[in-house]
Image (cartoon, rainbow, N blue to C red):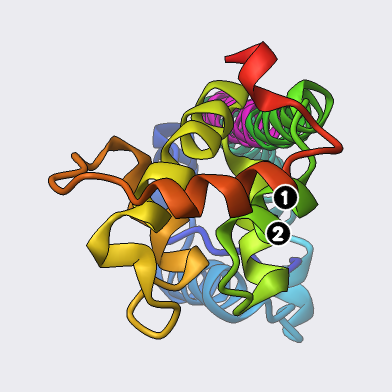
Amino acid sequence: MKATNKKSFVYYLDWAEQTLALPSELRLKIDDAIKRYVLYGEEPKDREVLYSMFGLMRMQIDRDTEKWDKTCSVRSEAGKMGNEKRWGKKSQIVASIANATTKLQMSQGVASIADNVNDNVNDNVNVNTNKIRNRVACSIPFDDFWNLYGKKVDRKKCEKKWHSLTDEQRNSAMKHVPRYISSSAGRELKYRKNPLSYLNGECWNDEILDEPDTNVGVVLENRTDKFNYEKEW
């Protein structure tokens, strides 16, 4: 008898009826042989037992055990298939959710990158456009302001600031500078504001409180011979 996990066996009624007709000693030997066969798979060595009802009983026990093993195998396979089907669906759902989440994150990331790129490009275009617009619209060269103002300090910074102004601001500065210089506040060079401070503070909007010196006008007139701003203003 092959090894099995079966914990019981069927003792049929016809076996009981037939063994009861046998002598008690032989009946006891057959019963013991059946038990040892079922428990340990041992074959009886007693020829009297071996060629008695034991042979028929053993064949039936083997058929029952094989049938039971097949049933257990079928149930085990069915259970495995059920688990695989159930957990397979869950795995597919989990995988689908994970894929959807990954795609969403990637799409959001791409959208964010695209937005950032577009923002950066637009900002750079706007900045560059403004710079070009200011340079094109700069009808008054920086040297005109530089020579007119007279106090020549921080030329590089002043020139950069001059080109960042609008043409309207530059025109206002060129109109205001002669009046500022002729006033008591700007008459002496050492007390005159540095040109960068003048431009940063948009001092062309400041009010001139004292009367201009007419002598300064002559000097300024000589400085503006090349570019006649009086005609433009």
Q: Residue at x 57, y 59 (%)?
A: 149
Q: Amino acid at mark 2?
A: Asn
Q: Is residue 124 left or right of residue 75?
A: right
Circle 1 — which element? helix
Q: Is residue 105 magenta?
A: yes
Residue 64 tag number: none
Quadrant (top left/top right/bottom left/bottom right) for the N terminus: bottom right
Q: Is residue 61 visible?
A: no
Residue 138 at x, y percent in the picture: 75, 29
Residue at label 1? Answer: 223
Is 126 drawn above or below residue 215 in the view shown? above
Q: Is residue 180 visible?
A: yes
Please tell me in which quadrant of the rendered image residue 12 appears: top left
Give, as a single range, the part of the protein colored magenta.
Answer: 89-116
Between residue 28 and residue 121, name the one nearer to us: 121
Sequence-first disc among 2 and 1: 2
Q: Position of residue 96 (x, y in %)?
A: 61, 25
Q: Nearer the viewer, residue 1 or 18?
A: 1
Residue that label 2 marks: 147
Q: Name the kind of residue labelled 1 in the image.
A: Arg
